Image (spheres, rainbow, N blue to C red):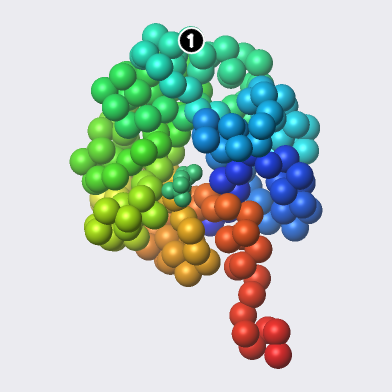
Amino acid sequence: MMKIFLDTADVSEIKRCWKTGLIDGITTNPTLIRKSGRNHEEVYQEIKDIGLTDISMEVIGSKENMISEGKRLYKKFGKVATIKVPCTPDGLLACANLSTDGIRVNVTLVFSVAQAVLSAKAGAKYVSPFVGRVDDNSFGGLCLVKDIAKLYREQMVTTEVLAASLRGVRDAARAFEYGSDIVTMPPKVFDGMYNHVLTEK
Ligand code: G3P
């Protein structure tokens, strides 16, 4: 039911937002980890210690590398670890391999319905359409979310839609309206969800 994830590797921001009781998980990526200036595994451990039970940890490189790194992270962090792989031929082979082992996989960098079809067939737990990035390229990011959610419903696919690359409150809310199971957003977008001019008054 409408899960809200934070798209950040900033542990103090996660702590602050976690206190609202409304956060269901975290997504990270190499850029966010770099921005935090910290070691990725330290960051994952601290997020786990806060109490989060679903943390997307991105792996990169060859198929073999993504598989071995994914398994190692799962062994180290247990069930809180969701392994994030890119939607490429190697990424989807890694997805199939890890999923078969019962590891949750988040297929990221999804820009089309066709890619969402392949991700579901590879056993992805989550598929992450990149709303903002699609918008940046003059296609409709929210339409993509809508089309994937509709397709999964019609085909009775169990892969969940995790809308990502959300930059504003309106788009975050709309992503749910269009059928997203999960929306990941920066903490400042989450904060903004509380606001309304009439509430201020
Ligand atoms: O969840 C994906 C996100 O980290 C990328 O967001 O805003 O850089 O497209 P953005």
**Would residue 25 appear left or right of 157 to someone viewing this image?**
right
Q: Which one is in front, 58 or 80?
A: 58
Confirm whether residue 26 shows in the render. no
Camera-side residue of 154 and 23: 23
Q: Amino acid at mark 1?
A: Ser
Residue drawn at (37%, 13%) of the image = 62
**Residue 138 vertical placement versus 165 (above, below):** below
Q: Quadrant of the C terminus?
A: bottom right
State the SS at label 1: helix
Q: Looking at the rendering, which quadrant does residue 73 occupy?
A: top right
Q: Seen in the image, is 78 located left or right of residue 18?
A: left
| Residue 179 sits above or below residue 133 on the image | below
Query: Residue at the location (71% across, 46% down)?
Result: 14
- State the residue position of label 1: 68
Residue 182 coordinates in the image, percent (x, y): 50, 50
56 sits left or right of 133 in the view: right
Quarter the N terminus occupies: bottom right
Q: Dividing the picture into quarters, in which one does residue 54 lie?
A: top right
Up/down of 50 relative to 141, above or below? above
* Residue 39 seen from this side: yes
Q: Position of residue 39 (x, y in %)?
A: 67, 24
In this rendering, the count of numbered labels is: 1
Camera-nearest residue between 177 and 60: 60
